Image (cartoon, grey):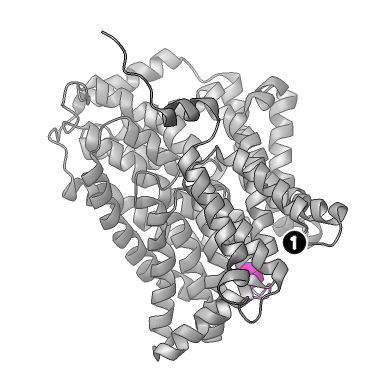
Amino acid sequence: MKRPTPSLYQKLQDLVPFRIIPGIFCLAVYWAIYLMPVYWRPIPEGLTPEAWHFIAIFVAAILGIILKVMPIGVMSIIAIAVVGLSKVTASTSKAAIADSLDSFKNPLIWLIVISIFVSRGLIKTGLGARIGYYFIALLGKHTIGIGYGLALCELLLAPFTPSNTARGGGIVHPVMRSIAYAYGSTPEKRTEQKVGTYLALVNYHSNPITSAMFVTATAPNPLVVNYIAEATGQNLHLTWSAWALCMLVPGLVAILLMPLVIYLISPPKLKETPNAVTFARKELKKLGPVKGAELIMMFTFGVMLLLWAGLPAFLFGPAYALDPTAVAFIGLTILLLCGTLSWNDILKERNAWDTLVWFGALVMLADQLNRLGIVKWFSDNLQIAIETSGMGWPAAMAVLVLTFMYAHYAFASTTAHISAMMLAFLMVGIQLIPADYQNLFVLLMAAAASLMMTLTHYATGTSPIIFGSGYVTLGRWWGVGFVMSVVNLAIFVIFGGLWWKFLGLW
């Protein structure tokens, strides 16, 4: 059969490495914003010409990431180059490119990158799979028990895997699919609803909850820490242990209720699964006894957890406190010295190097929004709009949290969403909400920054992996996602609010 002749557009698309129409759209948006003061209306009061030019760059860059014109790393390199060449942040090229690269010395960026290297050991040694199958062997007599096993596996791995995609999609999802296959529950056979749909949903919805529980559970959390400290004038700077303590109770309640809620709204056809225990035990037998490399991984995680929790400072005083990034380097050093990870493993960890580039670029863009006065201008206008509406501070807090969270329907990247909106929303809340209740607001915003990942099949890197396996239809994904977003947010408002009150935070 003769193949159809490709269209002119398809020929052009095959010649270039970017998506043509989204790329043209981003350029058009850039020029429309940049030239608006020339052809339409003057620059808004409170902004400089350089700030207005930067807004054009920022909006075009975020749109390019959302529309996936090119991979996020490439878009980030382009953003760094444009900021450096445009000289919107400084009057000389040398100073401008220094501003473009300034964020790469931020320790929080390196915390995430080094932690991704460390988490590579979970996959290489097989410890991640062993943990997953152990929980299935322990809880797998019923389908809901398997769900709880997957959720608990997520929870155990979360403090050490800052790539929520690697955790949910690379470690837990293969375990989930193996179990579904063992029961003949596959999309190919149209038997996915037997157990697979339920397990895939639990696999996914564990991810946002655990991401909210630890600074090192997803890449954008350190950015959230920075924004909260900046918005509160350093009055609330969440350390690793402080974040974990704040999110402990609402996170545990959410992770314990989630498999049950999904069981009620999307129940599996097969309720009893006694063979899952046998299957998990067979897989554990294949893995053999715990290997030396796995013991080293467990030792390393134990050391990192104790150091992140501040044990040296607790035992010997503040002088012995360790920065979280220093702790991550200690963990990586142990694994390299013991041979659990090799330098080749580090070089091949593309996800970490990719994160270094795009995360550094987005942090730079967010920092410049603040330095150029754009965040203050936006937050001042948003504050005026809320005050003009006449709503009280409780309603204002609800509007800010809900708007921030559900705006994620428009984003395919949590980092892009947080970079674009969070600092401005935090600053508005700090201005409108009485001081006694500000910590309640910022902690809810911190939780929402991860919980918003429940919403869509493109919400974060984990979602296309699990959705792409074919176990969940689009309608069910969005429906369950919305229900879980409401349930999770309610849990953090109620249980989180009470827990934070008990801790004396508001």
| Residue at screen point 35% across, 56% down | 254
- The image quarter in which residue 285 lies: top left
Q: Which residue is mark 1?
A: 88
Quadrant of the frame with the N terminus: top left
Closer-to-camera residue (65/383) = 65
Whole-percent x, y for residue 167 in the image:
47, 37
Q: Does the segment drawn in magenta span residue 378?
A: no
Q: Residues within 10 Å of mark 1 (few under 14, many from 20)?
A: many
Whole-percent x, y for residue 470 in the image:
27, 31
| Residue at screen point 72% across, 56% down | 315
Badge 1 element: loop
Whole-percent x, y for residue 260 in the image:
23, 49
Left or right of residue 84, residue 18 in this image: left
Residue 390 visible (yes or no): yes
**With respect to residue 288, does 8 lie above or below?**
below
Closer-to-camera residue (181/43) = 43
Q: Does the segment drawn in magenta span residue 231?
A: yes
User: As shown in the figure, which amino acid type bears the numbered disc 1?
Assistant: Val
- The image quarter in which residue 374 lies: bottom right
Left or right of residue 483, residue 170 in this image: right
Closer-to-camera residue (343/329) = 343
**Residue range highlighted in magenta:** 228-234
